[in-house]
Image (cartoon, rainbow, N blue to C red):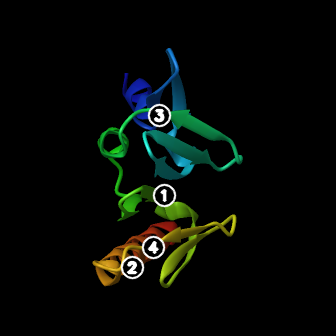
Amino acid sequence: MKYYKEVFKKRIAVKVKRQHRYLEINDIMYVESDKHVLNIHLKDSRVIQTTEKLSELEKTINSKRFIRCYQSYLVNMDYIKDAKTDFILSNDIRIPIRVRGRKEIIERYHKYYSAERMNDHL
């Protein structure tokens, strides 16, 4: 039972047209809201579209590794390779960081990154 919970804890269901698609949370690089459509960008370059709200998807994912850096972006910090005025992802995509709160957002990323590096050395 424990294994079952761990496996499904790392996946989310998103509604795509009239069916549900199950996505590994680790595979999500970032989510971009464009009008009333969410584009979920995966590490294999696929983009899954859904009409769910970004705030609802953020609650569903419920992971400390994701950061809301702009009104229409949710980013998996595991894929960030640089953070200045934008996040630069491992595939060189630039994700804007809002001006208001930028310092706190970047600090949160650095704190997450430092904690992950510490965990890697344990």
**Which quarter of the figure is the N terminus placed in?**
top left
Decide: marks 1, 4 in contact (CB < 8 A)? no
Secondary structure under badge 1? strand
Q: Residues within 10 Å of mark 3 (few under 14, many from 20)?
A: some
Q: Position of residue 62 (x, y in %)?
A: 32, 46
**Can you identify the residue that label 4 sits on?**
113
In three-dimensional space, the C-alpha distance between marks 1 and 4, rounded to whole angstroms, equals 11 Å
Decide: marks 3, 2 in contact (CB < 8 A)? no
In three-dimensional space, the C-alpha distance between marks 2 and 4, rounded to whole angstroms, equals 10 Å
Any mark on residue 68, and which? none
**Does label 4 or label 3 sit earlier along the sequence?**
3
- Tell us which disc is closer to us: 1 or 3: 1
**Can you identify the residue that label 1 sits on?**
76
**Does label 1 or label 3 sit earlier along the sequence?**
3
**Can you identify the residue that label 3 sits on?**
11
Instruction: Residue 72: name its quadrant.
Output: bottom left
The answer to whether one can see residue 122 in this image is no
Secondary structure under badge 4? helix
**Can you identify the residue that label 2 sits on?**
106
Q: Nearer the viewer, residue 112 or 47?
A: 47
Decide: marks 2, 4 in contact (CB < 8 A)? no
| Kind of residue sitting beneath label 3 | Arg
Q: Nearer the viewer, residue 67 or 116?
A: 67
Secondary structure under badge 2? helix
**Does label 1 or label 4 sit earlier along the sequence?**
1
